Amino acid sequence: MIKYILIDHTADIGIDVFGGSLQELFTNAAFALFDIITDLSKVEGTVEYKINISGIDKEQLLVNWLSELLYLHDVKNLLFKDFCITDIKDNQLNASIRGEVFREDKHVIKTEIKAVTHHCLSIVQEDHQWKARVIFDI
């Protein structure tokens, strides 16, 4: 199964993300975020962070999850490639993420993402598969 696809969206970047479980959906969304930002083949898992996120529902939880990852990228100059969600419920997520600090001599930023938006945000379960649509402000 593919993890995500890019979708056309005026002046922004949109993705449709897929997963066999809610956990896999959120993992693939995080992967898509950083796959858009950088070449993940050049990112190593030398730094680990534990993350605990909450939201009022699954959609808000997804936005908060991706926004926290983007915050760590922006503020701490980190790139992530491994996402291990240890527990997820409708309004709570616990995860361990691995990556490394951005280095100009090693990494390239392909696309700068400013924010995760609520525009066209959706999470649905169809035929034992989860699908989410997320739009990133660039």
Image (cartoon, rainbow, N blue to C red):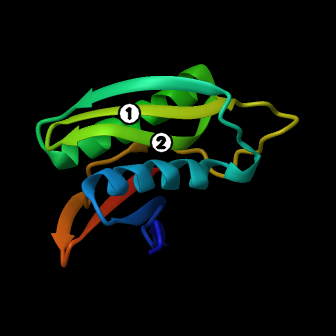
Instruction: Tell me the residue that label 2 is attached to.
Output: 83
Left or right of residue 22: residue 17: right
As drawn, the residue found furthest toward the right would be 105
72 or 98: which is nearer to us? 98
Quarter of the figure with the N terminus: bottom left
The residue sitting at the top extreme is: 76
Residue 62: x %, y % from top left = 29, 45
The kind of residue tagged 1 is Ala
**Image quadrant assignment for residue 50:** top left
Is residue 49 placed above or below 66 in the rendered structure?
above
Q: How crowded is mark 2: few (under 14 residues within 10 Å), some or many (20 or more)?
A: many
82 to 129, vertically: above or below: above
Give the left or right position of residue 70, taking residue 40 as reference. Answer: left
Lateral position of residue 136 relative to residue 90, left or right:
right
Indicate the position of residue 64 as horizontal and vertical percent values.
30, 36
Q: In which quarter of the image is residue 115?
A: top left
Residue annotated with mark 1: 95
Label 2: state its secondary structure: strand
Q: Where is residue 108 in the image (x, y as percent from the top left)?
A: 76, 45
* CB under 8 Å between discs 2 and 1: yes
